[in-house]
Amino acid sequence: MNRGQPDENTVRAALALACRAPSVHNSQPWRWELCDRSLHLYADHTRSLPAVDPLGADLVVSCGAALHHLRVGLAALGWRAVVHRMPNPGEPDHLAAVEFEAREPKEPHVALAAAIPRRRTDRRAFSSWSVPDEIIGQLVRCARAQGVEAHEVTGRARSELLAAMVKAAVVQESDADYRAEIREWTGVYPGASAGVPAANIPVGSRQYGDLRLREFAPGELPQTDNALLHEDAGSLLVLSTSSDDVLSRLRAGEAASAVLLEATSAGLASCPLSQPLEVVETRDLVRDQVLGGSTCPQLVIRVGWGAFNADPLPATPRRPLVDVLTRQEQP
């Protein structure tokens, strides 16, 4: 890097944090290119899941989460990320170009970056304690700071959302290609660099109160208290945007990252839920019946207090940086 720019070790440290971002079934569908004065994010369609994610929306949302993780990591290391989203109209997979400005890190930047290695997708039952309104409000504000709406879904809207989830599951589970992708990407063997390991998938029922989560491969993660299966008080937030193009999905991923890291900092457990938005029919149902047709849903996030005696979750695997980063040498 040139003078006035972060050195390559700093950029690599920020990228290591970026690549801890959540992604659909931990597919990590991104690649990065490092140039002399900039860093570029591309969608990696070799990591796509066409049966699970036929619209390609989950892939772009995943990349947006990695972009926000990068911004957080750079801020904690003393650099502001100047992001140009969708910089090349002729190259739709080029999602962002990032330039760097020196900026003194502040305590909130460091605290948010510290949440990155602690964040986990927790698919277990949550406790019976409700999340306070003030924390939900802060999560909503975090999404809005990224240009994305967030709504806590309660009452009849929650019932409509849960019905859409059930309908999406029925549609997907009748599809042999979908079932094959679930087998490929979940319950993965130890040593895999991607996918959801059995150690992160709960044993037994996925029915938590009125909520039923997606069926994965058989898991090895014990539920700490079977009573919680009936008492789960997790909240559901829907992230939505005014339009449904690639830029909107990228922004939604950034907002998802902001919400998940803030939730982690507050001590909450969290779990992104994309299933009701992966089927066109149920995506439309969520838009019309849950959001009143006003905005386009991009992701559901479940947040709540983890069980009091729940064991810490292991980290899911990550692809080595050498597999996702290339260096563009200048002539």
Image (spheres, helix red, strand yellow):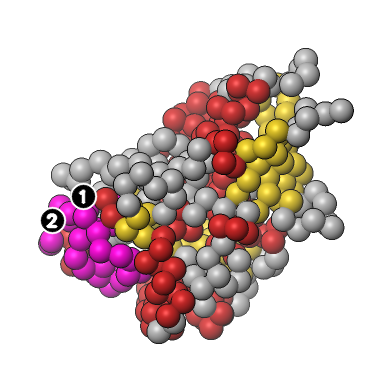
Report the residue marked by disc 1. Answer: 307
As drawn, the residue found furthest toward the right would be 331
The region drawn magenta spans 200-227
Position above or below: 25 against 288: above
Q: Residue at x 56, y 48 (%)?
A: 65
The answer to whether residue 126 is left or right of residue 56 is left
Q: Position of residue 74 (x, y in %)?
A: 61, 29
Image coordinates for residue 214, horizontal then vertical, percent:
35, 69
Q: Label 2: state its secondary structure.
A: loop
Query: Which circle marks residue 225 in the picture?
Result: 2
Indicate the amino acid at tag 2. Answer: Asp
From what the image shows, is residue 140 above or below residue 118? below
Of residues 223 and 309, the one nearer the viewer is 223
Q: Quadrant of residue 5?
A: top right
Quadrant housing the C terminus: top right
Q: Which mark is residue 101?
A: none
The mark total stands at 2
Q: Residue at x 65, y 23 (%)?
A: 8
Q: Give the x, y percent position of residue 220.
A: 21, 55
The residue positioned 44% from the left and 58% from the top of the image is 25
Q: Quadrant of the N terminus?
A: top right
Measured from the top left, where is residue 303 in percent x and y? 37, 54
Q: Is residue 226 magenta?
A: yes
Locate residue 190 relative to residue 158 in the image: left or right. Answer: left
